[in-house]
Image (spheres, grey):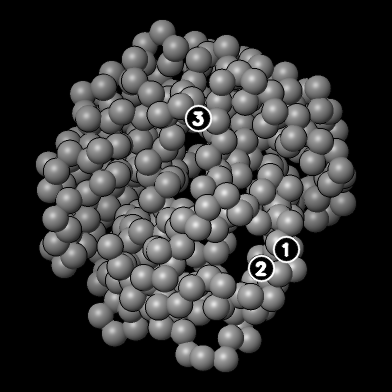
Amino acid sequence: MPGITEPLMEAVLEEEIRRMDVYLSVLRPPSIDTLYIGGGTPSIVPPYLLGRFLERIFVRLPNTPKESTIEANPESLSIEFLDVIRGFPIDRLSAGIQTFQGSFFERFHRNSSPEINRAALTLVKEEWDRRFSIDLLYGIPGSTVQEALADLEEAVRYQPHHISLYQLTPEEDTRYGEAVQKGKVKPISSSREERMRRTLLRRAEELGFQRYEVSNLALPGYECRHNLRYWELRPYLGIGPSAVSTLPGMETGIVRLTEKTNLKQYSEPHNIKNTTEWEEISAAVFMKEVFLMGLRTIRGLRRDFFQRIFGVTIEEVVPRSIQKYAPYIEQKDKISFTLTERGRSWLNRILLDLFDEIDQYPRLIHCNWPSD
């Protein structure tokens, strides 16, 4: 968050604690399974503020989560930051390394560099004795399959337990997105991008990592529990600027909350309803999201979970798509509904057909969520 002043940062953190108190008093969760501190850059918070903030979070929780993760960017990852978070039950550190290719930072991300990345990872390797994850990008304009592979090989030398491989896409409000929109940069071809993806996944598996989702790999037993709960669309609460929550609603069954993005607006004391967008999620829309999230994972959708939520089987809702894509659907058991490796490369196409068939389903779709 470049340019943010310390008083504003403190005001935002104070508002996050206030909202946490409100949500916990209303929801009264008996326990919290996972905690994820990130989405922004916790490592830029001054150590004295971060320590006080974390203390106020953990003292409010009804239990110590089974997994707690915190994010850090390499340019702000320091020994002081590690010293603070070591004092709390945080067992995962996620570092947004992105790449070791200098050209990327020169063109799109001037706050970091390959040297900063290496220094941060060396510090983590030497000073952090708990789990940690590395985020890498591939598909960088002008890059080769060999350069993407070199990024992975270098990252693994720092002995992470988990790796996320994300395709670089021209998102709005990013330097890359703006450069593509203005025609200054041409994205790499889809065929080269696919070669990169397959090469990276194959090499990561050779190095002992197992893929458990389209973009995420882990050493056996080190999968991110928080990710798995999110992809299964369990209820989750997000607090902070731009945070999103999906929670059981009193009237419609499912409600999605999206917090304001603007830090100053967020930090001003308001009624939560006036600073948060509330969206009622229909059963049909939620069914699409269940397919969208579940089919990204290697284990896919649990058939019994789907039927408990919607009161129908997967085969009843999307029979035509199942017939059309039968060669791409894993048929090993009747417990899960998942795609083959080839099917996952066709995921977007398959989802479009699934969504179209859900829209044409002749009966009213009901939703009982959460069902367990």
Where disc 2 sits, the SS reads: helix
Location of residue 333 in the rendering, given as x and y in whole percent from the top left corner: 52, 52
Q: Which numbered disc covers residue 322?
A: 2
Left/right placement of residue 354 relative to residue 208 reads right
Residue at 16% across / 47% down in the picture? 61
Location of residue 278 in the rendering, given as x and y in whole percent from the top left corner: 38, 75
> For mark 3, what is the residue?
218
Callout 3–callout 2 Cβ contact below 8 Å: no
The amino acid pointed to by label 1 is Tyr
Question: Eyeballing the image, is 351 above or below 282?
Answer: above
> For mark 1, what is the residue?
325
Query: Camera-side residue: 241 or 282?
Result: 282
Mark 1 → mark 2, Cα distance in angstroms: 5 Å
Mark 1 → mark 3, Cα distance in angstroms: 29 Å
The amino acid pointed to by label 3 is Ala
The amino acid pointed to by label 2 is Ile
